[in-house]
Amino acid sequence: RSRGFLYDADLPGLCNSHIAGTLKDTSLLQELASKASAAPVTDLKSFASEYIDVFSTGYNYAFGIAAAAMLVSLLIYILFMKMLPDRKKQAEAGKKTIQISRAEEKQRITALLLVFLVVIFFWMSFHQNGLTLSLFARDYTAKSVPALTNVIFDLRSLLSLIAAIFGLVFLAGRKSTVTQRTIGGLLLVAGAALTCYFYGTFGTDNPIEPEIFQQFNPIFIVFLTPLVVSIFARMREKGREPSSPKKIGWGMILAALGFVVILIGSVNLASPAELNGEPSPYRISPYWLITNYLVLTVAELFLSPIGLSFVSKVAPPRFQGLMQGGWLGATAVGNKLLFVGSLMWVRIQLWQLWLIFVVCCLLSAAFIFSILRRLEKATSG
């Protein structure tokens, strides 16, 4: 609640439409306004203006906090930069730069450019989480959840649950020391107790905000990175670890699977064009989006760190910096192509929109596998 108003994802659009004079039926606005306001709403126009102003101010503060956090990060870097390894000194003290032929340089650069072409479409699809997937969370995903589901949406209970999980990992770890197991046991008990306590404070119907779905990608990154790394390590021990290009190809297939999940959840939902600015009367479970984020995160782990490692390994020594810049440039181009999602959002059915990204990812995967030998040759060269 902010200044006497509860946030409702449907209200900003309705308020803006009412202020612009394009909202023909104000009954839904009146109903939601009465629920969102602590005081009776008699003047919808005044309510709409004040409601927009209140939450716009909140966004301004949020951006201010983000800017301050960046400055703190910069300060930490400046204070501790002397503790970071100096790559220039390491290179001077280490081996001489390896020289390779112009023909091999051309082969490696060509292989990298082909990979850059593929990752453009990955980032175009993946970063829909900040665009069309967020619009989907706002317009088509349930606005409230039961108490058990709210455990992963409420920050306090989520952090408690994470502490309990980490405690269990330390406690059950084969190589954990006595100290680690003691700490793990304490974390498990304290985290579980706090999770149960917060769960008891939740109601039967708990409102959630659409932007909260953005938390799942970083949370999954933290939890899944050690798991994926350990799986690859075990495969390496058995001599069955796939090559870096093959991992990238599988990452594209996983990304396609993530959009298949949300495509299935979108079947029979009205398109944004059909809603004409009105909120959807039918909303689906938040677990559709959570599962989408889970699969996309696994795809990211297959592609992003593996891709950077691939660039570092394959790039000719005298073009290392340029090729790393090429990877970042491909990421930037992928982000620039995000408009494809917003452009199609109001033009086609939802399932058709997600199908575009499914096809893009599958075609990219097929392209990677079609030149796999060439890429693997560049890696081993």
Image (spheres, rainbow, N blue to C red):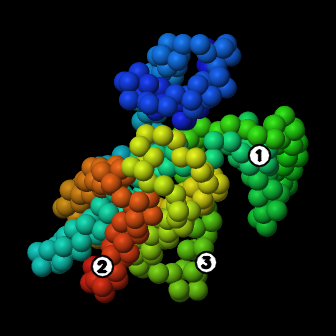
Type of the residue with mark 1: Pro
Q: Which residue is nearer to you in this view: 60 or 195? A: 60
Q: Which residue is nearer to you in this view: 198 or 207? A: 207
Q: Earlier in the sequence, mark 3 or mark 1?
A: 1
Q: From mark 2 to mark 3, how far is it between C-alphas?
A: 28 Å
Rate crowding at label 1 as few (under 14), some (14 to 19) or many (20 or more) other CA atoms within 10 Å: few
Q: Which of marks 2 and 3 is nearer the N terminus?
A: 3
Residue bearing the label numbered 1: 146
Q: From mark 1 to mark 2, how far is it between C-alphas?
A: 44 Å
Q: In front: mark 2 or mark 3? A: 2
Residue at point 55%, 35% (across, down): 9
Give the quadrant of residue 110: bottom left
Type of the residue with mark 2: Phe
Q: From mark 3 to mark 1, how far is it between C-alphas?
A: 39 Å
Residue bearing the label numbered 3: 234
Figure quadrant of the C terminus: bottom left
Please say if 239 is above or below 137. Answer: below
**Element type where label 1 sits in the image:** loop
Left or right, 53 with reference to 233? left
Rate crowding at label 3 as few (under 14), some (14 to 19) or many (20 or more) other CA atoms within 10 Å: few
Q: Which of marks 1 and 2 is nearer the N terminus?
A: 1
**Element type where label 2 sits in the image:** helix
Q: Position of residue 157 (x, y in %)?
A: 76, 40
Q: Where is residue 244 in the image (x, y as percent from the top left)?
A: 40, 74
Is residue 311 at all visible to an observer of this figure? Answer: no
Left or right, 36 with reference to 113? right
Give the quadrant of residue 236: bottom right
